[in-house]
Amino acid sequence: MADKQSIGEATKSVQTSAVPKQEDKEQKKSTQGSLNSGSGDGGKTAEKSEKPAGQPTAYSMRPAFGEMFPLPTIKNIMNNVMADKLKDKTYDKDVAKTWTSEIADEVNQQIASSSKVKRYKHVVQVMLGQELGAGATYNSRCCWDCDCDTSISEVFSNTSLFCVCTVFGTYQY
């Protein structure tokens, strides 16, 4: 019996000896803080370590209601640029390549300079063809988030040519 009691007491003493070790660690930390407070910074280092960390900045994963891709603004930009560039033009296959580049660049610059397009990346695609009376089909496909990302297409046509301009807007996470 005496042996069992001494074993029980030994285990108790081992368990209680672990608690002072935790306190020793805390005392070492506090003495390190007091050592830092004696440094030339006037104790600011110790105060900084004792303050809780500030709240991290919020990161929005979705655009707010008023910050969605501004489709009416983009539509107006596309219509104005296409009308200005192609108003009285007749189709010429040699010049059509430069017209598509000019239209795409102009639309891209105006969208990028717009203050309403925050955190959106956009792609501008322009297709220009000769108006011959035949039907044409234009399809596009993309993988994206249906809640945040969108696209808009506008068509300009006169007696000689047609132009389709598409802008894809994707939210930058």
Image (tube, grey):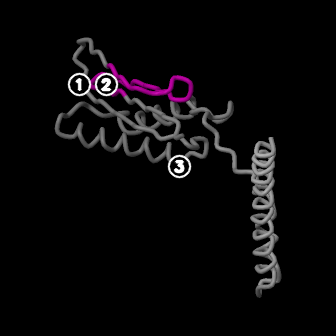
Is residue 162 found inside the magenta-colored segment of the image?
yes
Q: With 168 as the anchor, is 33 left or right in this view?
A: right
| Residue 71 rendering spot, x and y as whole percentages | 55, 29
Instruction: Give the residue at x 68% y 30%.
Output: 65
Q: Which residue is mark 2?
A: 162
Q: Amino acid at mark 2?
A: Phe
Q: Amino acid at mark 3?
A: Ser
Measured in 3D between alpha carbons, the distance from the residue under mark 2 to the one under mark 1, in whole angstroms, is 6 Å
Q: Which residue is mark 3?
A: 113
Measured in 3D between alpha carbons, the distance from the residue under mark 3 to the one under mark 1, in whole angstroms, is 31 Å
Instruction: Determine whether label 3 and label 1 are within 8 Å by CB.
Output: no
| Residue 161 rendering spot, x and y as whole percentages | 28, 26
Instruction: Give the residue at x 62% y 35%.
Output: 63
Q: Nearer the viewer, mark 3 or mark 1?
A: 3
Rendered position, 155 above or below 88? above
How packed mark 2 is, by other alpha carbons closer than 10 Å (few <14, some 14-19, many 20 or more), is some
> Quick one: 161 or 148, which is closer to the camera?
148
Instruction: Give the residue at x 37% y 39%.
Output: 85
| Residue 135 rendering spot, x and y as whole percentages | 26, 12
| Residue 103 rendering spot, x and y as whole percentages | 36, 40
Q: Secondary structure at mark 3?
A: helix
Instruction: Determine whether label 2 and label 1 are within 8 Å by CB.
Output: yes
* Residue 130 badge: 1
Q: Which stretch did the figure color magenta? A: 139-164
Q: Amino acid at mark 1?
A: Gln
Return the disc, 2 or 3, that comes first in the chain's sequence: 3
Q: Secondary structure at mark 2?
A: strand
Rendered position, 118 above or below 14? above
Return the disc, 2 or 1, that comes first in the chain's sequence: 1
